[in-house]
Image (tube, rainbow, N blue to C red):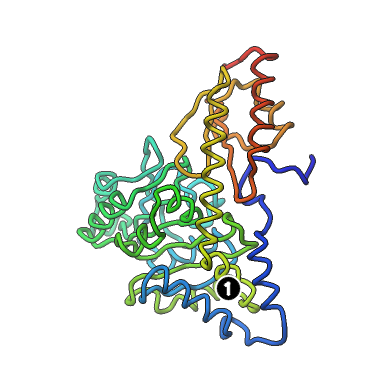
């Protein structure tokens, strides 16, 4: 495989943005106190409060899975459960880490577009106060979803209102929160603080960072002991200045929005170009930086050799094409030219 070529497998595959590198290099001088007791981390904390409000408390971690698992762990007892979409990232793409490390049950809800609705939550609220049943405690949503769809502020507010009515916490997996906010033309605060989210993961890795996420608590009364949860879960960085500066870079000079907007625009262009090719269909709307196409099954392997991507549903032939901050128009045109050649030369086989 030509590793120098950009492809459409994942925004995780993109390199670190130069502005992130530059701020990391600026921190790479002299000694700084470890484990977050440094000026670089305090600057990051100030930036998070500027974006998300005075009560926002961020805790940097290494990984998206670590952010989700530790954030949920701060909200749950072992007899309690998390309500989430059937194809939420915590349910299908974290190798059972939530169940293993939380000791809690995930209550899955089938959804047509990857998004939970208040009626989905209410439908899972049975067996309350019955010692024979796990007790729902947290609703977790993914923004943007594993189907590439986006929750609007009104949709999150409706879920938050439902959670408040039933004494539940609302957790948001924000690995692609920046892409959702850019797609909707709103701030990240409009999708979190302003609509009643309690805890969210702030994703950096998919948006131009090297390895930087944060668990952000938005209510002062929760998360008081999270620093111990983070340490026990092996997500406390000793040289935290290097993690913190990545988040600071993304939150400065609108870099988070510039990167996300570009990735989204490339996904829109990719869908528009691919839609012209006979034989290409689409599974869901393209609302952020992911395109979910339905291809003839005999096209998939040859196209993966041209530009690698992942198969999302083998039975239906659904594939995922992800764009990132460094995707170019030329990348899109090159791939769609390969699609056109495939359509001309290879009869479609759907079964």
Q: In the picture provided, is 299 more to the left or to the right than 317?
A: right
Q: Is residue 4 left or right of residue 160?
A: right
Of residues 315 and 3, which is closer to you in this image?
3
Quadrant for residue 119, please give it. top left
Of residues 136 and 16, the one drawn nearer to the viewer in this rendering: 16
Q: What kind of element bears circle 1?
A: helix
Q: In the image, residue 237 lies at what x, y percent?
A: 61, 75
Let me know if residue 99 appears in the view.
no
Extreme residue in the right direction: 2
Residue 108, percent from left and from top? 39, 45
Binning the other alpha carbons within 10 Å of mark 1 as few (below 14), some (14 to 19) or many (20 upward) gives many
Q: Residue at 35%, 74% (x, y): give it.
A: 222
Q: Is residue 80 above or below residue 42?
A: above
Image vertical order of residue 348 relative to residue 46, above or below = above
Say left or right for 351 vs 72: right
- The count of marks equals 1
> In terms of image quadrants, where is residue 113?
top left
Above or below, 80 against 113 in this view is: below
The C terminus: image quadrant = top right
Residue 67 placement (x, y as % from top left): 51, 63
Residue most extreme to the left: 165
Q: Nearer the viewer, residue 81 or 273?
A: 273
Taking depth in this image into account, of 278 and 58 the one nearest to the observer is: 278
Write down the quadrant of residue 284 in the picture: top left
Q: Which residue is mark 1?
A: 244
Residue appearing at x 71%, y 78% in the figure: 28
Residue 349 can be seen in this image: yes
Residue 4 picture location, percent across and down? 77, 46
Identify the residue at horizontal 38%, vertical 59% (top origin).
171
Q: Residue at x 37, y 39 (%)?
A: 110
């Amino acid at each position: 495989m030509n590793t120098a070529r950009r492809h459409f497998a994942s925004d995780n595959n993109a390199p670190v943005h130069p502005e992130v590198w530059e701020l990391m290099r600026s921190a790479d001088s002299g000694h700084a106190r470890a484990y977050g007791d440094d000026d670089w981390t305090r600057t990051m904390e100030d930036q998070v409060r500027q974006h998300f409000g005075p009560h926002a408390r961020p805790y940097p971690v290494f990984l998206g899975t670590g952010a989700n698992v530790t954030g949920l762990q701060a909200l749950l007892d072992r007899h309690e459960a998390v309500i989430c979409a059937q194809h939420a990232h915590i349910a299908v793409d974290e190798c059972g880490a939530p169940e293993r490390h939380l000791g809690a049950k995930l209550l899955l809800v089938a959804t047509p577009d990857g998004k939970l609705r208040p009626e989905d939550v209410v439908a899972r609220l049975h067996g309350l106060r019955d010692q024979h049943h796990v007790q729902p405690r947290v609703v977790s949503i993914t923004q943007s979803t594993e189907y590439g769809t986006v929750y609007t502020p009104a949709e999150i507010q409706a879920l938050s209102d439902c959670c408040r009515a039933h004494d539940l916490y609302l957790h948001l997996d924000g690995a692609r929160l920046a892409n959702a906010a850019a797609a909707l033309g709103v701030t990240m605060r409009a999708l979190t603080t302003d609509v009643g989210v309690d805890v969210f993961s702030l994703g950096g890795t998919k948006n131009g960072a090297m390895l930087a996420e944060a668990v952000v608590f938005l209510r002062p009364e929760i998360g008081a002991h999270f620093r111990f949860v983070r340490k026990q879960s092996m997500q406390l960085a000793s040289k935290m200045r290097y993690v913190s500066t990545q988040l600071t870079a993304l939150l400065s000079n609108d870099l988070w929005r510039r990167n996300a907007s570009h990735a989204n625009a490339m996904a829109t262009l990719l869908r528009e170009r691919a839609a012209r090719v006979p034989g290409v269909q689409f599974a869901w709307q393209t609302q952020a930086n992911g395109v979910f196409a339905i291809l003839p099954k005999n096209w998939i392997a040859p196209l993966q050799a041209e530009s690698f991507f992942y198969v999302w549903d083998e039975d239906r032939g659904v594939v995922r094409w992800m764009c990132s901050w460094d995707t170019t128009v030329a990348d899109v045109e090159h791939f769609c030219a390969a699609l056109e050649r495939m359509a001309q030369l290879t009869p479609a086989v759907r079964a």
